[in-house]
Amino acid sequence: MTPDIGQGGCAALEDSVVLARNLAEALKENDRKQQDDEDKRIERGLENFARERKWRIFDLISVSYVVGWMQHSDGVVMNFLRDKLAKFLAGMLMKKASFDCGKLIVS
């Protein structure tokens, strides 16, 4: 992810919370199931994590790329569009910072 929207570190923190939550949910049944089944539960937790985070990260990477491309482009037309769309883009970028990772349950 390019640094153009300043969400790389936040996305990493979101990833850590979502990963911990998905692995905890997958391993929560530890007392009821055999140890041999633990690998399959971890795999299922990782698959759930990837499924949950895929579109959020795709969105951040895509927006970051477009913003970077607009910022580094030259030309009269691009400068005009960038200046006119700046307010709209600022509002859209602020929405990217609002994401609910869910809650971690302490047992």
Image: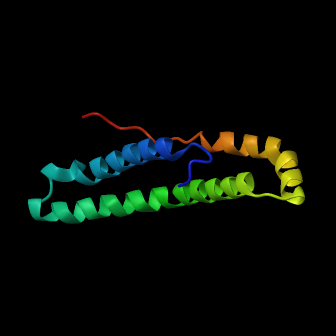
Residue shown at the point (39%, 43%) measured from the top left = 17
Residue shown at the point (60%, 57%) measured from the top left = 59
Residue shown at the point (86%, 53%) measured from the top left = 81
Q: Quadrant of the C terminus?
A: top left
Is 90 situated above or below 40? Answer: above
Task: Choose between 94 and 18: the one closer to the eye.
Answer: 94
Is 59 situated above or below 83? Answer: below
Task: Choose between 29 and 24: the one closer to the eye.
Answer: 24
Q: Position of residue 25 (x, y in %)?
A: 30, 49
- Extreme residue in the top direction: 106
Q: Position of residue 24 (x, y in %)?
A: 28, 47
In-image side of 107 versus 67 (left or right)? left
Is 58 situated above or below 97? Answer: below
- Extreme residue in the left direction: 35
Q: Quadrant of residue 92?
A: top right
Residue shown at the point (89%, 52%) measured from the top left = 80
Q: Quadrant of residue 16?
A: top left
Q: Position of residue 22 (x, y in %)?
A: 34, 51
Task: Choose between 55 and 63: the one closer to the eye.
Answer: 63
Q: Quadrant of residue 43?
A: bottom left
In-image side of 82 versus 41 (left or right)? right
